[in-house]
């Protein structure tokens, strides 16, 4: 019995210390919030005392936490990224165990992020070398960037769980100034641009803006929008311009605080923050959250109510993390027909692959076969966690007949326990569902007999022979 009791003790010192630092609290202040002494909190943070149920409940109440976020998770984003890194051939002889990776990711997330960034820079450099792009650089030629701006910004946004309270407050303020009917946001935005900023909006033919969809001429005070933009796209462009004009200093200050490694990355950070503010202005938090809950997260109905696109509504759903008014914690992925990921956000943990695409068994890829239709699926990750997902193709601009295909696929999902709140789950047996087994990148996925496997797991031995053809093109030993 004594051993069993010990096994159940929780030592969360590193996570509690990280939480305190993220909140900017001293030990004395956090101790007051939790109703314990500073010396006792110090013992908790040093793992010299286990965390009791009472302390856990006080943590959840004081800081509006999901207690699951404090538990150790070997499939967390940090752990998944490190697992992919250490699956590289160069580390194979080290035999780094999964529990070691989970321990590092749990106790030192900053170090984990640094390792992942270094590995990404290494991969980028190696690709350039393979192409011969930098085999003999000219004198004075710029060195390749150590950080890919889009990767850095994506990781930064995910670290904030895609929720920015400061931007939400600004969006509420701007929305109150506009006071638009939800379906006439564009009209209200045009009026404010004209009346407050002296800016005229013009929709111009494709040949006037052949390589862009929006351009602001600050000298002539004109905002040009391409005719290929959908109505929702034009509204978003107006909201984006208002965000820059009315909250530019705040966006600059926020971008500066983020500590981007270079100017291009800092520029992309600001654009991303302005995009967030624009979307939040079009879909104010309280009204959008209420509509989503009332309509059982029927994205088509929510989209129509606010005059936004399917993708815009999906993206907004991943940001509903306001304390006291949280929505279903969704994750979102956007891919093209070749499987390239161009957008990845999550309001909760999901084991996204950091260096590869989405698992081919997830039907986000097959949604291209049924354009414009929502397809659902229940998937199970290697850790046994189940998720309810839905996918649909989207088009952001009108594509000329002879133009390049602009169709993309958006995938959404949440933990299965939240699926009953979604209209899409009606009629399904959520207690005993049929789940499709998916995994992360093939090189770290250890699911056997997968007919869509593209590579063997790096930590397993191939078992190919001349006499048997397996379901998987890369059969491997179980251990």
Image (spheres, grey):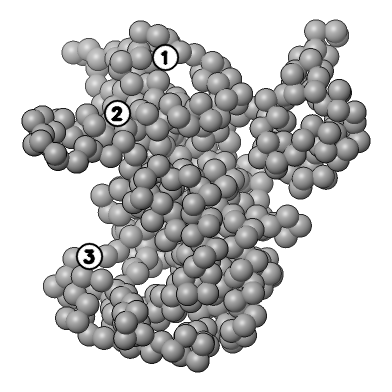
- Left or right of 284, for residue 372: left
- In the rendered structure, which disc, 3 or 2, sits on the residue that comes first in sequence? 2
Residue 302 visible in the picture: no
Quick check: marks 1 and 3 in contact, CB under 8 Å? no
- Dot 1, crowdedness within 10 Å: few (<14), some or many (≥20)? few
Residue placed most toward the observer, 69 or 378:
69
Q: For the residue labelled by badge 1, is the local secondary structure a helix, a strand or a loop?
A: loop
Distance of mark 3 from mark 2, alpha carbons? Answer: 33 Å
Distance of mark 2 from mark 1, alpha carbons? Answer: 30 Å
- Against 318, is 456 above or below? above
Residue 81 visible in the picture: yes
- Dot 3, crowdedness within 10 Å: few (<14), some or many (≥20)? few
Q: Which residue matches tag 2?
A: 122
- Dot 2, crowdedness within 10 Å: few (<14), some or many (≥20)? some
- In the rendered structure, which disc, 2 or 1, sits on the residue that comes first in sequence? 2
Residue placed most toward the observer, 174 or 421:
174
Measuring from the top left, give residue 285's x and y in whole percent: 64, 67
Q: Which residue matches tag 1?
A: 478
Task: Please report the residue visible at 55 percent of the width from the left and 63 percent of the height from the top.
Answer: 250
Which numbered circle lies on residue 405?
Answer: 3
Q: For the residue labelled by badge 2, is the local secondary structure a helix, a strand or a loop?
A: helix
Task: Please report the residue visible at 72 percent of the width from the left and 60 percent of the height from the top.
Answer: 325
């Amino acid at each position: 019995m004594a051993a069993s009791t010990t096994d159940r003790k929780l030592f969360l010192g590193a996570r509690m210390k990280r939480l305190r630092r993220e909140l900017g609290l001293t030990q004395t202040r956090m101790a007051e919030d939790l109703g314990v002494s500073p010396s006792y909190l110090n013992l908790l943070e040093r793992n010299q005392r286990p965390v009791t149920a009472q302390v856990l409940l006080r943590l959840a109440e004081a800081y509006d936490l999901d207690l699951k976020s404090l538990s150790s998770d070997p499939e967390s984003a940090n752990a998944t990224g490190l697992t992919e890194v250490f699956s590289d051939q160069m580390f194979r002889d080290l035999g780094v165990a999964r529990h070691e990776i989970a321990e590092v990711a749990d106790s030192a997330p900053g170090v984990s992020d640094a390792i992942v960034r270094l590995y990404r820079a290494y991969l980028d450099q190696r690709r350039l070398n393979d192409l011969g792009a930098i085999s003999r650089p000219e004198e004075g030629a710029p060195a390749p960037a150590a950080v890919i701006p889009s990767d850095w910004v994506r990781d930064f946004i995910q670290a904030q769980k895609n929720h920015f309270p400061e931007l939400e407050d600004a969006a509420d303020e701007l929305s109150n100034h506009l006071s638009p009917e939800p379906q006439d946001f564009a009209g209200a935005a045009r009026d404010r641009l004209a009346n407050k900023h002296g800016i005229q909006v013009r929709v111009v033919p494709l040949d006037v803006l052949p390589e862009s969809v929006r351009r602001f001429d600050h000298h002539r005070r004109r905002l040009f929008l391409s005719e290929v933009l959908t109505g929702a796209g034009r509204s978003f462009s107006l909201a984006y311009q208002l965000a820059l004009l009315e909250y530019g200093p705040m966006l600059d200050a926020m971008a500066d605080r983020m500590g981007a490694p270079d100017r291009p990355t800092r520029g992309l950070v600001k654009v991303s923050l302005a995009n967030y503010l624009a979307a939040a202005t079009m879909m104010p938090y309280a009204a959008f959250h209420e509509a989503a809950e009332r309509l059982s997260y029927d994205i088509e109905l929510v989209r129509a109510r606010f005059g936004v696109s399917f993708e815009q509504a999906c993206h907004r759903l991943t940001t509903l993390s306001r304390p006291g008014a949280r929505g279903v914690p969704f994750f979102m992925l956007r891919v093209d027909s070749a499987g390239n990921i161009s957008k990845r956000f999550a309001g909760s943990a999901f084991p996204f692959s950091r260096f590869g695409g989405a698992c081919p068994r997830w039907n986000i890829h097959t949604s291209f076969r049924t354009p414009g239709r929502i397809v659902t699926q229940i998937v199970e990750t290697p850790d046994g966690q189940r998720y309810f997902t839905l996918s649909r193709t989207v088009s952001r601009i009108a594509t000329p007949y002879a133009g390049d295909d602009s169709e993309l696929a958006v995938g959404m999902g949440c933990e299965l326990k939240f699926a009953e709140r979604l209209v899409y789950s009606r009629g399904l047996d959520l207690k005993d569902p049929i789940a499709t087994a998916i995994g992360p990148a093939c090189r770290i996925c250890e699911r056997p007999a997968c007919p869509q496997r593209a590579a063997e797991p790096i930590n397993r031995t191939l078992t190919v022979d001349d006499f048997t053809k397996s379901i998987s093109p890369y059969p491997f030993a179980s251990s």
